[in-house]
């Protein structure tokens, strides 16, 4: 049965407009994104098939272009559309966070860093550069590495912090393995960076590790 033959209050789009997006299931939200189904399958049927195939919305959203376009009903145009939606969501988080002091919004800071860095297939080291009110000046991804390590150079971090005239900084990197506990190398480079930035009067507020579940905070765990 086509979705247009469903009762109005059961159609995903109408349900969203009447009751809000939060009441929709993953399949219903995905169906609105898909807009149309395929021969013999409604958009909701197709959405359910895709969730079973990939395991979750997140897995579908994070798969490569080649893998994404192998699924029924998906192609390059849908992949481009999805990437645009995800990037708009990231920019919305960024703009929202820029209006706040990151010290007073640790959850928002973690959400932003997670949205930027979760799903990368290799390690990436990034910095949030902050002013003296702890509001964001800039977010930059400075170094990229392999699946399990990346080289971080304190001189480059200091140089970039000075370029932005930052008063404080938050480090962040991801663990593609999903394990968000810090390694000995993570602790060592954090100490080196903190010492280097201290010489130019720039404070280190935190180092966040993005893995599975909630991101790990050095500050909240007494490691700074």
Image (cartoon, grey):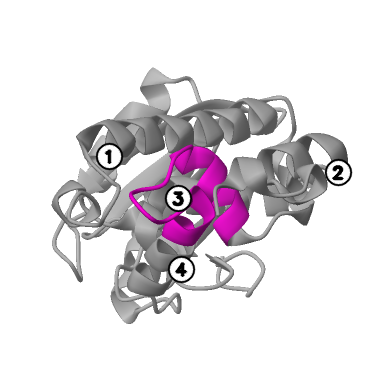
- Label 4, label 2: how many angstroms apart (C-alpha)? 24 Å
Report the span colored magenta: 27-47
Q: Earlier in the sequence, mark 1 or mark 2?
A: 2
How busy is the neighbourhood of tag 2: few (under 14 within 10 Å), some, or many (20 plus)?
Answer: few
Task: Report the residue that reaches farthest toward the right.
Answer: 19
Along the line of sight, the residue nearer the viewer: 5 or 60: 5
Residue 31 lies in the magenta-colored region: yes
Q: Which residue is mark 1?
A: 142
- Residue 97 place in picture, x, y as percent: 66, 33
- Residue 157 place in picture, x, y as percent: 32, 39
Q: Which residue is mark 3?
A: 171
Q: Nearer the viewer, mark 2 or mark 3?
A: 2
Check the image and report above or below for 168 versus 153.
above
| Dominant secondary structure (helix, strand or loop) of the stretch shown in magenta | helix
Residue 122 lies in the magenta-colored region: no
Instruction: Answer whether labels 2 and 3 touch (C-beta < 8 Å).
Output: no
Q: Which residue is mark 4?
A: 56
Q: Earlier in the sequence, mark 4 or mark 2?
A: 2
Which element is circle 4 on?
Answer: loop
How busy is the neighbourhood of tag 3: few (under 14 within 10 Å), some, or many (20 plus)?
Answer: many
Instruction: Answer whether labels 1 and 2 touch (C-beta < 8 Å).
Output: no
Which element is circle 1 on?
Answer: strand
């Amino acid at each position: 049965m086509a979705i247009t033959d469903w009762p109005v209050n059961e159609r995903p789009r109408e349900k969203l407009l009447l009751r809000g997006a939060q009441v929709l299931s993953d399949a219903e939200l995905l169906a609105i994104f898909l807009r149309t189904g395929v021969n013999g399958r409604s958009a909701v049927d197709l959405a359910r098939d895709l969730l079973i195939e990939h395991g979750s919305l997140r897995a579908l959203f994070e798969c490569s272009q080649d893998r994404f376009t192998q699924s029924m009903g998906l192609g390059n145009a849908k992949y481009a559309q999805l990437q645009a939606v995800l990037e708009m969501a990231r920019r919305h988080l960024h703009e929202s966070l820029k209006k706040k002091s990151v010290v007073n919004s640790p959850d928002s800071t973690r959400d932003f860093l997670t949205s930027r860095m979760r799903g990368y297939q290799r390690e990436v080291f990034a910095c949030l550069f902050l002013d003296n009110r702890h509001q964001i000046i800039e977010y930059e991804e400075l170094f990229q590495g392999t699946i399990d390590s990346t080289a971080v150079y304190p001189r480059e971090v200091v140089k970039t912090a000075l370029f932005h005239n930052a008063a404080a900084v938050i480090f962040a990197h991801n663990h593609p393995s999903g394990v968000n506990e810090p390694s000995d190398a993570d602790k060592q480079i954090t100490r080196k960076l903190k010492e280097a930035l201290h010489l130019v009067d720039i404070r280190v507020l935190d180092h966040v590790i993005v893995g599975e579940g909630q991101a790990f905070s050095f500050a909240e765990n007494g490691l700074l």
